Image (cartoon, rainbow, N blue to C red):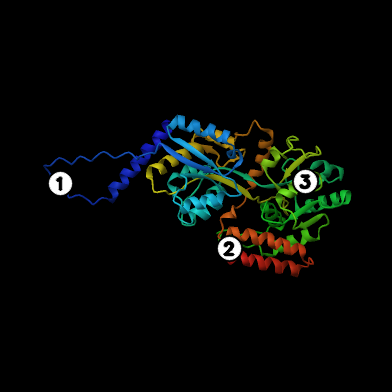
Amino acid sequence: MKKILALVMALCMIFALAACGQSAAPAAPAATEAPAEEAPAEEAAVASSISLWTYPVGGYGSEETVKAITDAFTAETGIEVTVEYLTYADGDDKVNTALTAGQAPDLIMEGPERLVSNWGANGYMVDISDMFDDTDKSEINAAALAACFAPDGAAYEYPLVMTAHCMAVNLNALKEAGADQYVDLESHTWTTEQFAEAVKALYAKFGGTVGAVYCGGQGGDQGTRALVNNYYGGTFTNAEHTAYTWDDAKNIQALKTLYDMEGIDFDAAIVGGDEIANFYNGVFKMAFCWNIAQQLNPNSAGTGEGKTLNGDDIVFMAFPSEDGVANLQGGIWGLGVFDNGDAAKIEAAKTFIKWMCDSEHTPEAVRASNFFAARSAAEGVDLSGVWADNEIMNEYTKLMPMLGDYYQVTTGWAAARTAWWNMLQQVGASDGSEDAIAAAVAEFCGQANAQ
């Protein structure tokens, strides 16, 4: 409570200084006159209630989990929080409808591709760049920090948690095929050469599809992008996030290599969820759509941590690269404030963000998500050991330094995702020649950049 009061007082001082700076300079008083007394600064009003809409970000899709957090916040601050739970199926439509009707919530929880590149870019969000001081900027993961800021310097999201998407292998199948020699189980990394040898051994032993480049839609497309981009070091966008660059020669080479590899199939009939189901059932020996959520609870049948339906061991792996160092696609989630024209609501929303993302309560907020802290410390509280008591989470932290550029904030992102899986379909249906693959890549990358 002391920190919240301190924050409010600090804001009051900032507002008071700003008011003085904007007022006209007074005439100099006569030498015999006593200086005029300044009126006391008015305290910034803070609303007693706010509304929060949250997408199912890890544990934040659970009403029981969220209520425990908001109840604790209310008990400490007196600010009540009403929560609405969104789904990814229709959440965007609900938010857009609310914005059109002028009935948006005070707070929203999701990722920068929505908060920064969509609603923020379209003028619906409050610029909260004033909440980031130099200490915050040094503590927050660089990729997460950059993703929360728009090109003009405005910030529309305060990051709370993040994760790195990866792939997974069936360790029992690898051992049976003699291919476990190609994976580094300590670092969870491998090279493209080791990956190719593993696929070769698995195909020789089991036949069929070892792994699928699924492209029936955008579901799980982070996996196919990471597979292709990492294989020979290609990129998906430029560093400025103003153009799509997947038409470079390295990505074309990767697609050609994967097309030619026995055991790797381009499958336009499935998406990421279907791939995981096939992997669970032992049909596929590896999956490209994987993250910590699957590793903690691999399937709805509840067969145990890190196990397939057949009881085989699942090992998470970084995507293969030539030097064994991957740039992993990440997920970043945090909170943003909708600009509803109510200063008191905005102040209360900022209070909630500070309480969640940068206070002694942050470890609890992070653990509730089942993801990883987006910063190293919060108000002096070391966050590096948040998952020290969880073997799987602690092991998975080895992937976090591999988190690459968060390019999902690039202009025309939604259209680019569609162009990507359509491109994969065309590559899979082609004759596999380099010219045919290059033509497909150029066509659909061009579509992405036309937006």
Mark toward the start of the polypeptide (1 vs 2) = 1
Mark toward the start of the polypeptide (3 vs 1) = 1
Distance of label 1 from label 2 (alpha carbons): 60 Å
Q: Which residue occupies 45% across, 30% down?
A: 76
In the image shown, does 204 or 140 lie closer to the viewer? 204
Q: Residue furthest left?
A: 32
Q: Which mark is residue 29?
A: 1
Marks 1/2 in contact by CB < 8 Å: the verdict is: no
Q: Is residue 306 above or below residue 111?
A: above
- Is residue 343 visible to us here? yes
Q: Residue 198, image x and y in percent?
A: 82, 50
Q: Nearer the viewer, mark 1 or mark 2?
A: 2
Q: Is residue 435 above or below residue 118?
A: below
Label 3 sits on a secondary structure element that is: helix
Q: Which of marks 3 and 1 is in front?
A: 3
Q: Residue 123, image x and y in percent?
A: 45, 55
Q: What residue type is labelled 3?
A: Phe
Q: Which residue occupies 61% across, 40% down?
A: 58
Q: Which mark is residue 360?
A: none
Q: Residues within 10 Å of mark 3 (few under 14, many from 20)?
A: many
Q: How crowded is mark 1: few (under 14 residues within 10 Å), some or many (20 or more)?
A: few
Splitting the image into 4 quarters, where does residue 173 fall? top right
State the quadrant of the N terminus: top left
Q: What residue type is labelled 1?
A: Pro
Q: Mark 2 points at which residue?
A: 243
Q: Mark 3 points at which residue?
A: 279
Q: Residue 18, image x and y in percent?
A: 32, 47
Label 2 sits on a secondary structure element that is: loop
State the quadrant of the C terminus: bottom right
Q: What residue type is labelled 2?
A: Ala
Q: Is residue 443 above or below residue 78?
A: below
Q: In this view, does 136 lie above or below 116?
A: above
